[in-house]
């Protein structure tokens, strides 16, 4: 079980709805370029995460997002800056792919993923607009 709580400030570059209904979100240090190193944070469904999911969907709609479909990536045109608080999680399921990204990440048409490593913040327990 995850025990270490961390807080991360960064820009939301992309998101998608995973098959397990987690919101898969990629965060980077700056709003551009897309190809910079990114980390994955995930917000699962459930009452404990409702405020964080609601905030993320508000940011999605404010950027022009209409419908978030399972497995279909959404790239933010104006990446919002957020503070994400949650538990540090080693997603070891992806550690066997022999890639720096663990075989994960929204590539945005590139051959390699901007996601670096298999550490995530999962679950996110609080998400705030940092502006």
Image: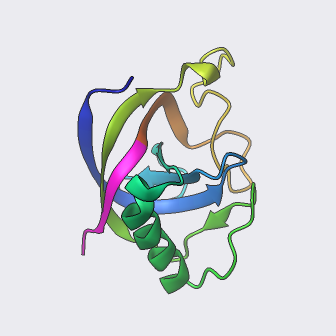
Return the residue found at the far front.
47
From the top left corner, tell me how far across and down residue 23 is, in percent.
56, 55
- The answer to whether residue 128 is seen in the rendering is yes
Residue range of the region highlighted in magenta in the rendering: 123-131
- Does the magenta stretch mainly form a helix, a strand or a loop? strand
Say which of 70 and 62 sits in front: 70
Residue 44 highlighted magenta (yes or no): no
From the top left corner, tell me how far across and down residue 116 is, in percent.
50, 34
From the top left corner, tell me how far across and down residue 29 is, in percent.
35, 53
Q: Residue at x 62, y 21 (%)?
A: 93
* Quarter of the picture holding the C terminus: bottom left
Say which of 7 and 77 sits in front: 7
Q: Is residue 43 left or right of residue 69?
A: left
Say which of 109 and 55 sits in front: 55
Q: Residue at x 64, y 37 (%)?
A: 104
* Quarter of the picture holding the N terminus: top left
Colour mapping: rainbow
Residue 130 highlighted magenta (yes or no): yes
Q: Is residue 64 left or right of residue 2?
A: right
Q: On the image, which quarter does residue 61 sit in?
A: bottom right
């Amino acid at each position: 079980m995850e025990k270490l709580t961390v807080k991360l400030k960064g820009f939301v570059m992309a998101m998608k709805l995973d098959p397990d209904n987690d919101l898969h979100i990629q965060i980077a240090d700056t709003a551009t370029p897309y190809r910079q190193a990114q980390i994955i944070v995930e917000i699962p469904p459930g009452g404990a995460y409702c405020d964080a999911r609601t905030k993320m969907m508000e940011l999605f709609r404010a950027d022009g997002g209409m419908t978030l479909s399972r497995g279909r990536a959404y790239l933010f045109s104006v990446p919002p800056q957020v503070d994400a608080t949650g538990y540090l999680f080693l997603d070891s399921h992806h550690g066997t792919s022999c890639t720096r990204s663990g075989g994960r990440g929204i590539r945005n048409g590139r051959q390699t993923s901007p996601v670096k490593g298999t550490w995530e913040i999962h679950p996110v327990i609080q998400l705030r607009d940092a502006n």
